[in-house]
Amino acid sequence: MILSVGEILADMIGKTENGVFSYERRAGGAPFNVACGVKKFGVKSAFLGTVGDDLIGKFLYDFAKEHVDEAYVRLDATHNTTLAFVELDERGDRSFCFYRKDTADTYLEAVPPLLLARANIVHIGSLMLSEKRGVDYAVNLAKKAHGAGKFVSFDVNYREDIFPDREAAVVLYKTMLELADIVKLSEEEYQAFGKEYVQRALKEKLVCVTLGEKGCKWLYRGESNALPTVPVKTVDTTGAGDAFYAGALSRLDGLPKEKWTRENLNRVFAFANVCGALTTRSRGAIDALPSLKEVISSAQ
């Protein structure tokens, strides 16, 4: 089982129809997207997060119950639900603006010990790092997971408007990167940290770098490989990286480190590439997730 912990929010995706601009409400939040993808790709999935006890929060609460195997979502009566406003360009690439000031997603409850005991991988979201209580929570959870013999997963998922500056964000991210066993970076994030840092400080980690329409690259213990993706007609890239990562984690679930061989990792990330690519064919991070049957068919 894969346990994802962190932000669950509403993606408000902008669109223009008949000269009228409006926002379409969709469930989102990177670790929640991953949790939904893991289930879609055939692996048991659990998610823990917090939403406001408001109209959007109740929508997300119900949505989570339907889309992951085990949803531990708390309704917080004193903090509102986070909103992410998303606008797409003509290629389907997105820009974000967060409505997020002291919102519910950083007020997380502790992971129940029995839930942690049943997980193979604990995936930790990154938005919580924008608050000190979130940093403390993430570090503590990573250490508890390691103490219980679990793999820790972390996706940088850098969002410019929730940190004072890039340099401050990089310092916080390095704290988590060095606690994780499995790491995901975008191509831009890889460049921000630098090749030398990744190859030196993260040498013992399994690092995957998403390259958009070029596919991905993985690095592990001095070995690496770049893998192409499948061609698709892109409509919306929202959640593509999360779908990719859900695909990767779903194939790593139950796979011990001694089996992280070049051959197996190539299989893992070829599958992940297809998951990410197929998700861009329609709008929304979760609604656009392909079925396991579609992924297998496209991967052949």
Image (tube, grey):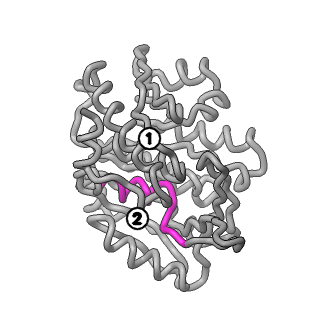
Q: Quadrant of the C terminus?
A: top left
- The amino acid marked with disc number 1 is Val
Residue 226 position (above or below residue 290): above
- The amino acid marked with disc number 2 is Leu
Task: Identify which residue, 212 or 33, lies in the foreground.
Answer: 212
Report the side of 184 relative to 133 (left or right).
Answer: left
Write the start and end of the magenta stretch as one range.
25-38
> Residue 120, percent across and down?
27, 46
Q: Are marks 2 and 1 in contact (CB under 8 Å)?
A: no
Between disc 2 and disc 1, the foreground one is 1
Residue 232 marker: 1
Residue 245 marker: none
Residue neighbourhood size for the residue with mark 1, other residues' Cα within 10 Å, grouped as few (<14), some (14–19), many (≥20): few
In the rendered structure, which disc, 2 or 1, sits on the residue that comes first in sequence?
2
Report the side of 157 relative to 181 (left or right).
Answer: right
| Disc 2 target residue | 48
Secondary structure beneath dot 1 equals loop
Q: How many marks?
A: 2
Indicate whether residue 27 is drawn in magenta. Answer: yes
Indicate whether residue 64 is drawn in magenta. Answer: no
Q: Residue furthest right?
A: 164
Q: Residue at x 54, y 18 (%)?
A: 200
Q: Residue at x 61, y 53 (%)?
A: 129
Residue 96 position (above or below residue 102): above
Main secondary structure along the magenta-highlighted residues: helix
> Residue 241, percent across and down?
48, 44
> Residue 21, percent across and down?
70, 71
Secondary structure beneath dot 2 equals strand
Q: Residue furthest front?
A: 18
Q: Residue at x 29, y 44 (%)?
A: 295
Residue 133 position (above or below residue 147): below
